[in-house]
Image (cartoon, helix red, strand yellow):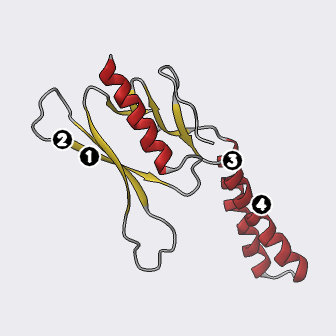
Amino acid sequence: MPEVLTPNSEFIVADSTIINLLVAAFFFLMPISSLWYDAGSSLLDIFMLLGFVPGVIFLVKAFKKRAAISVNKDGISFFNTSVTDWKHFKGAAAKQMPLGIGRISDNVILTVEYYKDSTVHGFYKKTIPLTNTQNKSEEEIIAAIEFFYRLSLQS
């Protein structure tokens, strides 16, 4: 269900807790199951325990509430660093980049175009990667950007 935006609200894109918990469970269960079926005390068993490392990383990411992208009445931020305010905003688009050799996952980026100062000569682009573990879709992000940009034009 899409989030209801108001002039004083903030649209926050963060890592999805559920997806990160599922990935963590996978990385925890993989070495446990391999040790269960092959209980030998070999060097391979030690390497299988290294599967716990990504499990811990994804478990920490699941409970860490850190905003990757924030859109509000002041502008757009990426990891708490302001990209642009609405006065200098030019446009934004989400694009599917071509898949590289051996890549099977999506490669979607959000491109934000903005002016550095009040001149209209030349603008800058900030590319923000949109990962598969984020809790908002690219369509929702673009809709939030359009909502707050239109709101800034009215004031």
Q: CB atoms at circles 2 and 1 under 8 Å apart? A: yes
The residue under label 2 is: 123
On screen, 34 above or below 124? below
Instruction: State the image coordinates of residue 151 (x, y, percent, origin top left).
Output: 38, 24
Mark drawn on residue 90: none
Q: Amino acid at mark 4?
A: Ala
Q: Label 3, label 1: how many angstroms apart (C-alpha)? A: 30 Å
| Relative horizontal placement of residue 44, taking residue 135 as reference (left or right) | right
Q: Label 2, label 3: how many angstroms apart (C-alpha)? A: 36 Å
Mark drawn on residue 125: 1
The N terminus: image quadrant = top right
Whichever of labels 2 and 4 marks the residue nearer the N terminus, that label is 4
Q: Amino acid at mark 1?
A: Lys
Mark drawn on residue 17: 3
On screen, 126 above or below 52? above
Instruction: State the image coordinates of residue 112 (x, y, percent, origin top left).
Output: 32, 43
Q: Label 2, label 1: how many angstroms apart (C-alpha)? A: 7 Å
SS for tag 1? strand
Count of numbered marks: 4
Residue placed farthest to the left in the image?
121
Q: Crowdedness of circle 4 by 10 Å Cα count: few (<14), some, many (20+)?
A: some
| Relative horizontal placement of residue 121, taking residue 144 as reference (left or right) | left
Q: Amino acid at mark 3?
A: Thr
SS for tag 4? helix
Instruction: State the image coordinates of residue 110 (x, y, percent, origin top left).
Output: 38, 50
Whichever of labels 4 and 3 marks the residue nearer the N terminus, that label is 3
User: Which mark lies nearer to you, 2 or 4?
Assistant: 2
Q: Crowdedness of circle 3 by 10 Å Cα count: few (<14), some, many (20+)?
A: some
Residue at x 81% of width, y 82% of height: 42
Whichever of labels 3 and 1 marks the residue nearer the N terminus, that label is 3
Q: Amino acid at mark 2?
A: Phe
The residue under label 4 is: 25
